[in-house]
Amino acid sequence: MTKTPPASPCRKPLRTLDPTANAVKILITGGDGQLALALARALRSAHELTLVSRRELDITDAAACQRWIGHVRPDVVLNAAAYTAVDRAESEVDLAFAVNCDGPGHLARACAGVDALLVHFSTDYVFDGHPSQRRAYREDDATAPLGVYGASKLAGEQAVASLCPAHLIFRLSWVYSNDGANFYKTMLRLAGERNELRVVADQWGVPNYAADLAATIARIATLPLDELRARRGVYHLSATAENPDHGVSWHAFATAIVAGAGLGNRVAVTPINTSDYPTAARRPAFSVLDGERARKTFGLNLPDWRDALIRCLAARASTR
Ligand SMILES: NC(=O)c1ccc[n+]([C@@H]2O[C@H](COP(=O)([O-])OP(=O)(O)OC[C@H]3O[C@@H](n4cnc5c(N)ncnc54)[C@H](OP(=O)(O)O)[C@@H]3O)[C@@H](O)[C@H]2O)c1
């Protein structure tokens, strides 16, 4: 991982628009990730965008964060950079905290210095998903991460909130898309290779198509800065599920992926228990997020998760 940022961070904006057209100047970090790519697609036609990958801006480098933000002077920074390897984090604790806590802290200081809004992303894994949890998690429910990834993301939330007065923190769950590495893509790959998939049926959450999250985040993050400053804080963003306090199991999600891809007759999706599939990190058994606060505050609804999956599969088919 490079610690040396380019001497002159001068990558051209993806698009420069007529300044009279309310274009917002936006810097997106973690530019090769699935959420960053979706955000870039959602924002590039109407706003002035600079998308930087880890090679260009390693957010663990405090000086590089200051240099990039000082140079671009964005109105909004969308921090989509993160250490997302949930199991590997158990043995790479320092790196997980450097990227998920120190990095957001460096960005927060730099944003505060130029009066920019910092939009940061966190996770449902800040909760422990205890079996006694009978309803979707609200923003002020007690956090209790089960693993290093969740703990490092929670520490990142705290760093952002304490160092940058203008911040929005969106907690997300089960993000998938046709980019990067994610559960949806893994299921499609394995369904092409096997005639049985064994998938955990006792962990519950809500799958979220990155394109839908990005469209919602794009609408919120480009509202007038004064309005956003007054609404700073933590928000849960979640697609709609048939029973919002119940969610969907990984097994149900995998079954829908296989059926949606037209492979339901050839590939069996067999339910298994978490104990049948040991992993380095413990995961919450239930991590459905309640999106009511964001809905009320910003008046935006994310679509139904099944409808989103059909659109994601259609987007995949159209590029093959
Ligand atoms: N994926 C999920 O299911 C999920 C669920 C809940 C919340 N979230 C949150 O949503 C956000 C976006 O996640 P995602 O799914 O888009 O993850 P992703 O696809 O893994 O993208 C993360 C990006 O961050 C980059 N990165 C890693 N270390 C970096 C560093 N030191 N400096 C700059 N960039 C760095 C990675 O670069 P390389 O490509 O070079 O490694 C990668 O491109 C994260 O905050 C994540 O915690 C994700």
Image (spheres, rainbow, N blue to C red):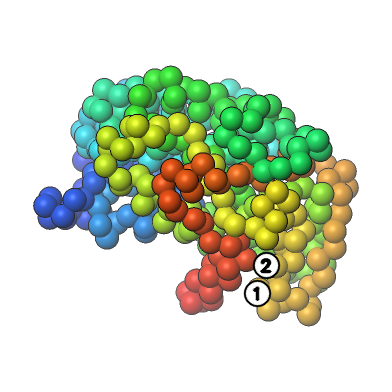
* Residue behind label 1 places its C-beta within 8 angstroms of ligand 1: no
- Please name the amino acid that badge 2 sits on: Ile
* Badge number at residue 257: 2
Confirm or deny contact between disc 2 and disc 1 (CB under 8 A): yes
Percent coordinates x, y for residue 275 in the rendering:
87, 43
**Corner quadrant of residue 215:** bottom left
Q: Is residue 122 or residue 152 the one in the foreground? A: 122
Residue in view at x 86 percent, y 49 percent: 273
Side (left or right) of 246 relative to 239: right
Viewer-side residue, 55 vs 62: 62
Q: Is mark 2 within 8 Å of ligand 1?
A: no
Q: Secondary structure at mark 2?
A: helix
Residue 197 x %, y %? 80, 63
Q: Which residue is mark 1?
A: 261
Question: Is any atom of residue 294 visible in this view?
Answer: yes
CA distance for labels 2 and 1: 6 Å
Please, which residue is most extreme toward the front here? 296
Q: Is residue 208 left or right of residue 32?
A: right
The residue lying toward the viewer, choosing from 135 and 249, is 135
Amino acid type at mark 1 = Ala
Pointer 1 local density, CA inside 10 Å: few below 14, some 14–19, many at least 20: some
